[in-house]
Image (cartoon, helix red, strand yellow):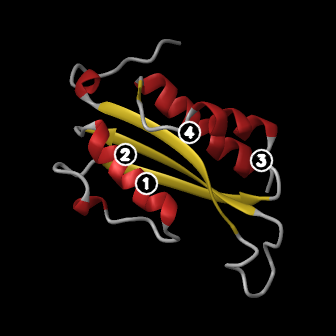
Amino acid sequence: MPLALDSWLPAIRHVVVCQAGQRLDDADPMLMFEGNTRYLAIFIAGNFTLDEANAFAVDTFDKVAISNRNFYFRDPPWLHTMAFSCPTVPEDIQYVVDNFSTVDFVDAYTFWLTRHMIEYHFRVDQ
């Protein structure tokens, strides 16, 4: 069934970016995540520029905590982040890591499909 979008939605910009963060060996004193790497997927929707999104993503990937969006965006967008850690990336999620490693605009369909794909994968495996 086709997805009906309101007329104002095409003006909203979408970004999906997913990158590997730090290895958790050094950051985990209890060694619960030994051998794992932290991955972070960032979903941004709203009225913003690529420069704003890139500055936010770069700072967020370098920190353990998610950066405050109000410091990076003139009009704070809707923001959703998903972090996961694993020794190797699952095949389904490797596609996201490979194809969304840089900050770039995507269409709304790709944005929501990618978000639901990651959520589904980690919900099913638990």
Tell me how far mark 1 sits from mark 2, CA to CA.
6 Å
Outermost residue on the bottom side: it is 29
Report the mark closest to the observer, 3 or 4: 4
Viewer-closest of 94 and 79? 94
Amino acid type for the residue under numbered disc 3: Val
Q: Residues within 10 Å of mark 3 (few under 14, many from 20)?
A: some
In percent of the image, x 30 and y 59: which residue is there?
69
Q: How far apart are marks 3 and 4 (CA)?
A: 14 Å
> Which label sits in the foreground, 3 or 1?
1
Residue located beneath label 4 in the image: 101
Type of amino acid under label 1: Val
> Which residue is drawn at the image coordinates 71% and 80% (left, top)?
28
- Asked if labels 2 and 1 touch by Cβ distance under 8 angstroms, the answer is yes
Query: Quadrant location of residue 54?
Result: top left
- Where residue 47 sits, quadrant-wise, is top left
- Pointer 2 residue: 54
Earlier along the polypeptide chain: callout 2 or callout 3? 2
